[in-house]
Image (spheres, rainbow, N blue to C red):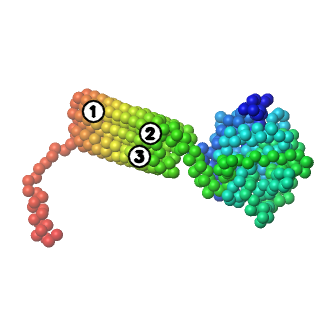
Amino acid sequence: MKQAVGEVAYVKPTVVVLAAGLGTRMKSGIAKALHPLSGRPLIRHVMATAARMDPEKLILVLGHQADKVREVIEGYRAEIVLQYEQFGTGHAVRQAREAFANTTGPVLILCADTPLVTAETLKGLVMDHEKTEAAVTLMTASVQNPFGYGRIIRGKAGVMRIVEEKDATASQKRIQEVNTGIYCFEKEFLLSSLDSIGKENAQGEYYLPDTIGLARKKKRMVSASLCADADEVMGINTRVELSRAERIMRERINRRWMLDGVTLIDPDSTVIGMDVSLGRDTTLYPHVSLEGTTKIGEHCTVYPGSRIVDSVIGNAVSIKDFSLIESSSIASEASIGPFAHLRPDSVIGERAKVGNFVEIKKSTIGEGSKANHLAYIGDATIGREVNVGAGVITCNYDGFDKHATVIGDGVFVGSDAQIIAPVTIGEGALIAAGATITRDVPADALAISRQPQEIREGFAGRRKRIRQRKGK
Ligand code: UD1
Ligand code: CA
């Protein structure tokens, strides 16, 4: 089925993603397709791009840790083909042969380790392919350091064949035009050439790039489409390359947010996940990391060293230095940190303040309430305009079970109080400093639990004199 895209028709391709390899050069127990890039497994980047191609059919070739890969791509409609032993990229595509035998469009091959390529670039490749009678249109790139890539051997009539790094002569190794591992094949040609690929090469593998030489032998046309941005088609084989890809992704994401009205004081050290959203006039200081599905509103400031995971933050919130916020929500104009830890399921109300060295777990802090210094609040529901003094602890765990604390509106909890849950403190009550609260406190009452203070006149002075006599 042809659809008009500009002047050239875009024919929906069948997309085959190769992801069976272990990724030996990663030196890892984790299959390469599962290594995260910007917080998402590599394979999910490629699947998302493949889905954006509006493919006639999406086929995924899996081998190493196939079950785990399957798990992370849940939600993508793909036919999965298994390659039990990895005998090379040509062998991998051969496993998918039946899956694309009855499709009508061209076959686009992608690799799980080339995650930065965009759907726009790939659509361009498919359209380039449709403009010609080529048996295959391959995407090439011109790179500074071609080490590891297949080199493009050109003759008078264009691309003749591809030579892999391990098979290349010294002069071929100097060629800087490389194979990106992305190809658009005429389906019939691909089907007919898969069995002709041999494995007489340095690695004893079936190389998919050998189809280029085969096409030339059959006097078929081979087209090459040079990718303008070589970064987009970089392959990830080692962790050094993974870190380069991470930097490229970070630059893309951060640039987009800056153009959307977010100030990044040091974009090089700011990490924003792909599924994060940010409001205008929010400012991120250096070394801030925003992960998962975090949403931050407008006019917020996140100071250095803070990490926010899967959390929702309103407008004009201030997250001060070195705070960790996990799966929590913070309403507008609240202030968190420095050095605060919000553990999962914490809900912080409007204008509330959570100060330094305060840990909050699975608790609600009402509007305008404050816990400014050194407190632990767990399994608590705290009303509005409550003051939680320095060093207050909700003792929520008795060694067996967790218990709840309920604190009404306007309560004042004095410093160093321990609240032994389950317990309820009524509205407007006053908890004296140092109190150990074991029973419910009625509204507007004072709860105090302390030894009466004793004064022994002159005691300290006598001790001092004794010490002086003994010369100590
Ligand atoms: C491949 C190309 C090389 C190209 C480079 C671009 C071959 C022989 N070489 O080399 O010309 O410059 O990509 O990045 O194709 N895979 C399987 N089954 C296998 C082998 C590989 O599914 O049996 C998958 C891998 O999981 C990976 C992709 O194919 O996603 C590429 O394999 P890799 O071993 O990384 O190939 P390169 O050596 O990088
Ligand atoms: Ca590779």
Nearer-N-terminus badge (1/2):
2
Which circle marks residue 303 in the picture?
Answer: 3
Q: Nearer the viewer, mark 3 or mark 2?
A: 2
Of all residues, the one furthest to the left in this rendering is 457
- Cα–Cα span, label 3 and label 1: 31 Å
Q: Position of residue 24 (x, y in %)?
A: 69, 56
Whether residue 153 is visible, yes or no, is yes
Q: Quadrant of the C terminus?
A: bottom left
Which circle marks residue 64 in the picture?
Answer: none
At a point 62% along the width and 49% down the height, the residue shown is 35
At a point 75% along the width and 41% down the height, the residue shown is 125
At a point 76% along the width and 34% down the height, the residue shown is 8
Q: Position of residue 372 (x, y in %)?
A: 31, 42
On the image, which quarter does residue 240 sit in? bottom right
Whether residue 38 is visible, yes or no, is no
- Cα–Cα span, label 3 and label 2: 11 Å
Residue count near mark 2 (Cα–Cα under 10 Å), binned few <14, some 14–19, many ≥20? many
Q: Are marks 1 and 2 in contact (CB under 8 Å)?
A: no
Which of 362/387 is in front? 387
- With 53 as the anchor, is 393 left or right in this view? left
The amino acid pointed to by label 2 is: Thr
The amino acid pointed to by label 3 is: Tyr
Find numbered disc 2 in the image and state the secondary structure of the residue it sits on: loop
Which of 237/455 is in front? 237
Q: Quadrant of the N terminus?
A: top right
Is disc 2's CB within 8 Å of ligand 1? Answer: no
Q: Nearer the viewer, mark 3 or mark 1?
A: 3
Which residue is under mark 2?
A: 282
The amino acid pointed to by label 1 is: Val
Which residue is under mark 1?
A: 411
Q: Position of residue 97 (x, y in %)?
A: 83, 41
- With 15 as the anchor, is 380 left or right in this view? left
